[in-house]
Image (cartoon, rainbow, N blue to C red):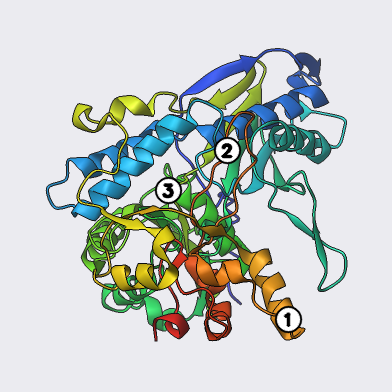
Amino acid sequence: MATKPEFKYAPMFQLGEDTTEYRLLTKEGVTTAEFEGKQIVKVSPEALTLLAQQAFHDVEFMLRREHNLQVAAILNDPEASENDKYVALQFLRNAETAAKGILPFCQDTGTAIIHGEKGQQVWTGFEDEEALSLGVFNTFTEDNLRYSQNAPLNMYDEVNTRCNLPAQIDIEACEGAEYRFVMVAKGGGSANKTYFYPMTKATIQNEGTLLPFLVEKMKSLGTAACPPYHIAFVIGGTSAEKNLLTVKLASIKFYDNLPTTGDETGRAFRDIDLEEKLLKEAQKIGLGAQFGGKALAHDIRVVRLPRHGASCPIGMGVSCSADRNIKAKINADGIWLEKMDANPAELIPAEFAQAGEGGNSIVIDLDKGIDAVRAELTKYPVSTRVNLKGTIIVARDIAHAKLKARLDAGEEMPAYFKDHPILYAGPAKTPEGYPCGSMGPTTANRMDPYVDEFQDHGASLVMIAKGNRSQCVTD
């Protein structure tokens, strides 16, 4: 008879010391008491609401200093392409503008995601998710952000919730007298670059089988989600959902302090060597920050998890250039928020301090007529920077769907869709005194299913969007 093994408990995620720089938000709403010889931290609903409200405000307008430093480093990289450097400069200028707290960093202000770890000595006595949701509600309704959440009325009909709720809130129980959070404003373009591959042991026989597999998947990311990316791969997992949750948290550097070796208990670890090799491979892909260069990724995280012997889940995901993640915590000393970069302007080299197109952008007058615009654009190869001036039509997913419905009903395509370039965009709220809120091209390939039919009706002849098109359009 086999000998019963000795019970050994070990947490799967054994994180090292948190070196995050926090700032004290307030001490109000947090009190302490004693129960059975242990200190209890009591948190009011107003404290959780304030925490979520301020966290999402900060992260919509400011990024982490580490991220901005990585962007700035591209400007001094002798191997970076001119397109890489141009994109990096625009991101820094965008960060400078956003840090003023009026126009958010990205038009897609995202889904509010809250991952919490609540120590057993933290007492609330109310519905934590409701208090956190109120904070999200306040930020999205009071700041110049966009409402992106659609509520299904039935399987096919939807209505915008007009407050960006519901938020995704997941709270885990843990030891201790601290309530820890990471809050993420996750845009659709970034979220859509999350992939799950149900593989087998054959994929992880050795580096010769795994590395080419991961490189091939990395190539499929394209540029639609605004590179340079923070890419995460997770190999293994006790379930598909555990794999993909780890992908999300690894992509925002939540697991940076994991061990770098595994053990017999099945603890998670980072493979630093594989991360470095994958980053070099990403630079070779050639897509760069936008169509040509080496800056597809700032960095890559690879986390190895235990797995069931019959399966080997592999997940891939990204945090895009709107790297909007912020840590927070509540303890006996008060409410704390991760310190974000309030002064990205100082990272812009003096010679680029004045805004402008820079480089050798080609000026295109969009009011000369759609045929003249097409003829002019045709002269230049892919990756040419152009400065577009004139009338454009802004239309995104819902507008395209409504136009498709009109065509299906036998109605005509509107003339404005034929006579002008179409910009795929969905602006955030317009601040008082401004002509428009934050607006930038959205993902091109989401509108690809409409292109053939619209062009058959003389529309969508010039389209302005970000990222790559799918095969049905490029053909």
Could you classify mark 3 by the number of other residues whose Cα lies within 10 Å: few (under 14), some (14-19), or many (20 or more)?
Answer: many
Mark 2 lies on residue: 435
- Left or right of 469, for residue 276: left
Quote the CA–CA distance across marks 1 and 3: 40 Å
Give the residue type at disc 1.
Answer: Glu
Q: What label sits on residue 321 in the rendered view? A: 3
Comes first in the chain, label 1 or label 2:
1
Could you classify mark 1 by the number of other residues whose Cα lies within 10 Å: few (under 14), some (14-19), or many (20 or more)?
Answer: few
Q: Quadrant of residue 74?
A: top left
Q: Secondary structure at mark 3?
A: loop
Q: Secondary structure at mark 1?
A: loop
Residue occupying the far left of the picture: 78
Quote the CA–CA distance across marks 3 and 2: 25 Å
Q: Who is closer to the viewer here, 437 or 231? A: 437
Mark 1 lies on residue: 411
- Left or right of 267, for residue 261: left
Q: Is residue 169 above or below residue 474?
A: above
